[in-house]
Amino acid sequence: MFFVGMFELSIDTKNRLSIPYAIRCKLNPDTDGRAFYIVPGRRSGTLAIYPERYFEGLRANTPAADALSDETFEWRQFEYSQSALLDPDTQGRILIPERLLKRAGIERDATLIGVQDHLELWSRQEYHAFQDQRWPNYPQQRAKAMQELRELAAARNESEPAV
């Protein structure tokens, strides 16, 4: 799965968000699952939404609790306690816990964006500010990011054993 795009949506009074058809049609229930995990986003004020089986696969190979530092264990305690499994209804809506919306500062007007392997939910106002901040320097930021991606790919290829 590969998520892109920006969707301006509304969260209804019951805290339901409709996952756009353009996103739903990309998901295969057999390989991706039917539900979504929602976790605090990497950026403050956002919530990250992952397809069920993809997220479980990301977290499946993490070390046992006894192998973790106290700091990493506490991060894991916090992230999992703040996460939720969201099962869409027949109309493709997910019910987002009120506590997560409040913590992220997301109200009724929201923006959902595709970020390659996951979705992010933002306050519409915050996303517009982020967008306005990024456009003026987009060519320079893109060049820098592409360089980093090339370097990471090269390092990964060097660490793989030759066949």
Image (spheres, helix red, strand yellow):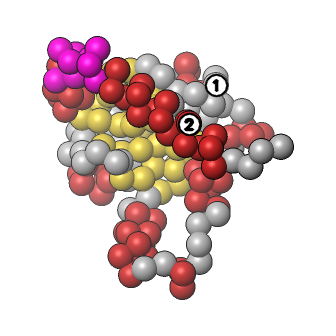
Residue 8 picture location, percent across and down: 33, 21
Q: Which residue lies furthest to the bottom in this view?
A: 66
- Distance (Cα) linking label 1 and label 2: 30 Å
Residue 38 picture location, percent across and down: 45, 49
- Quarter of the image for residue 95 reads top left
Residue 84: tell me if it is visible.
Answer: yes
Q: In this view, does 153 lie to the left or right of 74?
A: right
Q: In this view, does 160 lie to the left or right of 155?
A: right
Chief SS of the magenta region: helix
Neighbour class for label 1 at 10 Å: few (<14), some, many (≥20)? few
Which circle marks residue 154 in the picture? Answer: 2
Q: Which of marks 1 and 2 is in front?
A: 2
Mark 1, residue position = 26
Q: Residue at x 44, y 59 (%)?
A: 83
Three-letter code, disc 1: Lys
Quadrant occupied by the N terminus: top right
Which of disc 2 and disc 1 is earlier in sequence? 1
- In reply to whether residue 23 is colored magenta, the answer given is no
Query: Which of 63 and 37 lies nearest the eye of the viewer?
Result: 63
Q: Residue at x 59, y 66 (%)?
A: 62
**Image position of 116 with respect to 52: above or below:** above
Q: Is residue 16 left or right of residue 20?
A: left
Magenta segment boundaries in residue numbering: 133-141
- Quarter of the image for residue 145 reads top left
- In reply to whether residue 138 is colored magenta, the answer given is yes
